[in-house]
Image (cartoon, grey):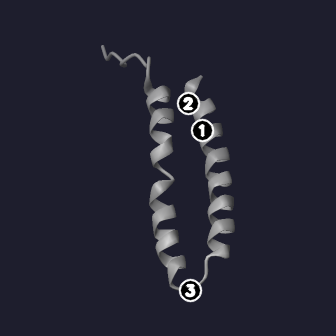
Amino acid sequence: MRKPITALILLVYIFAYAILAATVGDKITGWAQMPFYIVAGIVWIFPLKPLFAWMNRGTPPVEEE
């Protein structure tokens, strides 16, 4: 049940982050706009580490017979 919940949270987070980054990036002009988008394109993944750890916690290994 954790994977569908994580997928939904991930979709909402990425949508909100993209809207926020585009809004802030639109207000930045000139030479600073490209570095902002480079940093924003990398930084989005760091808050998701705890979400992925939660999703994978408690998943028993699959035993093959």
**Label 3 sits on what residue type?**
Gly
Disc 1 to disc 2, how far (Cα)? 6 Å
Q: Which residue is mark 1?
A: 7
- Residue 7: quadrant of the picture: top right
Element on which disc 3 rests? helix
What residue is at 67 percent from the left and 74 percent from the top? Answer: 27
Q: Which residue is mark 2?
A: 3
Do the numbered discs 3 and 1 sit on residues whose CB atoms are within 8 Å?
no
Do the numbered discs 1 and 2 sit on residues whose CB atoms are within 8 Å?
yes
In the image, 24 versus 41, the foreground residue is 24
Residue 20 percent location from the top left of the image: 66, 59
Residue 27 higher or lower than 58, as above or below: below
In the image, 24 versus 18, the foreground residue is 24
**Label 2 sits on what residue type?**
Lys
Q: Which residue is mark 3?
A: 30
The image's mark for residue 62 is none
**Label 1 sits on what residue type?**
Ala
Residue 28 percent location from the top left of the image: 61, 76
Q: Residue furthest bottom?
A: 30
Nearer to us: label 3 or label 2: 3
